[in-house]
Image (cartoon, rainbow, N blue to C red):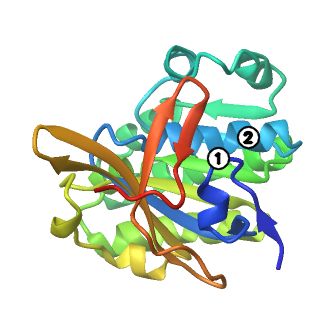
Amino acid sequence: MERVKTGIVGLDEMLNGGIPAGHQVFLCGGPGVGKTTLGIEYLYRGAKMGERGLFLSLEEEPEAIIRNVQAVCTEWKDFASLVAEKKIVVAGQEAYIHLEKGTTGAGGMQYAVSRVMSSLDALVSENDIKRVTIDSSTIIKMFFESGIEFRRTLMGMLKNLKKRGCTTLVTGESPTLERGELHFETEHFVADGIIMLYNLQQQEKRLPAIEVVKMRSTLHSKSLTPIKITSNGINVYVGEKVY
């Protein structure tokens, strides 16, 4: 089986060598758990291995994304140059604006989403993209009154990316930071994989952790594993216990 290595310390070990090529994986968790950082690191490590990546943000402008990455991952001295060389393509709020302008009814919404999907298609095709991170499905969902329409649109977008040979991460907000209070939506069940990030409460501390809940076509770790966000990205401490 062909696998796409995330390049993230410890995560590929949890995934038995990496994400199966072409999979669409939801990266879920509460605010501040590191979803965006992990999604960008997946692209950064891929670029270092010669695979071009696309980061589509519906929340921030490209300049803000680049500044935030450089502020957190200070050891990634070449991040800006990789973006300048289009080895990592960062697309920002222009997609969000398309959605916002389309919220004048069902027809307008359909038109706006089709524009975003067309832009995504063009970016993938023009830049020979192999890795995609979409941040986030939660923003897309805000523009749909119908959950069915949202899921149909999102899964159509992901299916098209798979046809183009992309392996995709999609971030999504969870309403809770606690593991025992989670619930999953329909789109999570039809996705190829689910990776959860947590900030678990222990007395007066919060402990960051990761869990591979689901990954089709491969064996994977089922252990709740501690992580740390460092100046060189995310470290996953395989074999160590959270508590």
Q: Secondary structure at mark 1?
A: loop
The alpha-carbon separation of the residues under discs 1 and 2 comes to 7 Å
Which residue is identified by label 1?
Answer: 8
Amino acid identity at mark 1? Ile
Position of the C terminus by quadrant: bottom left
* Relative image position of residue 79 (x, y in whole percent): 71, 22
The mark that comes first in sequence, 1 or 2, is: 1
Q: Are marks 1 and 2 in contact (CB under 8 Å)?
A: yes
Side (left or right) of 215 relative to 180: right
The answer to whether 13 is drawn above or below residue 74 in the figure is below
Q: Residues within 10 Å of mark 1 (few under 14, many from 20)?
A: many
Side (left or right) of 46 relative to 117: right
- Which circle, 1 or 2, is nearer the viewer? 1
Which residue is identified by label 2?
Answer: 45
Residue at x 80% of width, y 38% of height: 47
Position of the N terminus by quadrant: bottom right
Identify which residue, 120 or 82, lies in the foreground: 82
* Relative image position of residue 240 (x, y in whole percent): 46, 57
Mark drawn on residue 52: none
